[in-house]
Image (tube, rainbow, N blue to C red):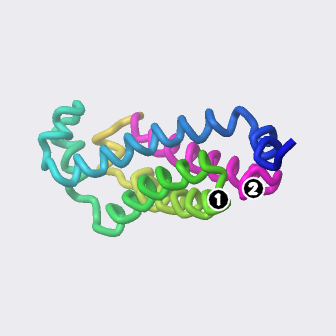
Amino acid sequence: MSDQTNDRARTPWHLWVVGGLNALWTAFGCFDYVMTNTQDDNYLRGMGMNDAQIAVYNAMPPWMTAAWAIGVFGGLLGSLLLLGRRRWAVWLLAVSLIGAIGSQLPTLFDTQAQAAFGSSIYLSVGVMAVAALVAAYAWAMSKRGVLR
């Protein structure tokens, strides 16, 4: 057996599932980021947001917008590296997690955001949880020697 065959045999099927689903998830995040920041309020209204919710987005400080970009673009690149079985995926997904926390955690403590979004504010918790789980998964795959 060649080394390439051995490498393929070591790659668990779930790496393709986790990497592929996270790539789709973060690709939507990248699309959402670009559209939110280039299409004014038209895109947000098209996504079903009301004026109070749009006001929350418009009041987002620049550092949160930067954290959002780091979260989604880092997550997409990290997912692609995970699919390519590259060790750098661990670092990029960790940076993506930090970006997700920086962009999402403050909304949980923002009374204006809570009033505007209601219980859907907990989507922020979901975003951070997915980022944490995928980063932990990449770390585990690196420790198992799947990533090179």
Depth check: 42 or 38 in front?
Answer: 38
| Alpha-carbon span between mark 2 and mark 1 | 8 Å
* Secondary structure at numbered mark 2: helix
* Percent x, y of residue 58: 20, 55
Membership of 122 in magenta stretch = yes
Query: Which residue type does callout 1 highlight?
Result: Val
Relative placement, left or right, of 138 versus 48 is right
Inspect the magenta stretch and tell me whether residue 85 lies in it: no
Residue at image point 87% right, 41% down: 1
Label 2 packing within 10 angstroms: few (<14), some (14-19), many (20+): some
Magenta-tinted stretch: 120-148
Residue 142's label in the rendered image is 2
Residue 48 shown left or right of residue 138 in the figure: left
Quadrant occupied by the C terminus = bottom right
Q: Does the rendering let one see residue 122?
A: no
Give me the residue at 24% from left, 42% from top.
53
Pick out the residue farthest to the right.
Answer: 1
Q: For the residue marked with disc 2, what is the amino acid?
A: Ser
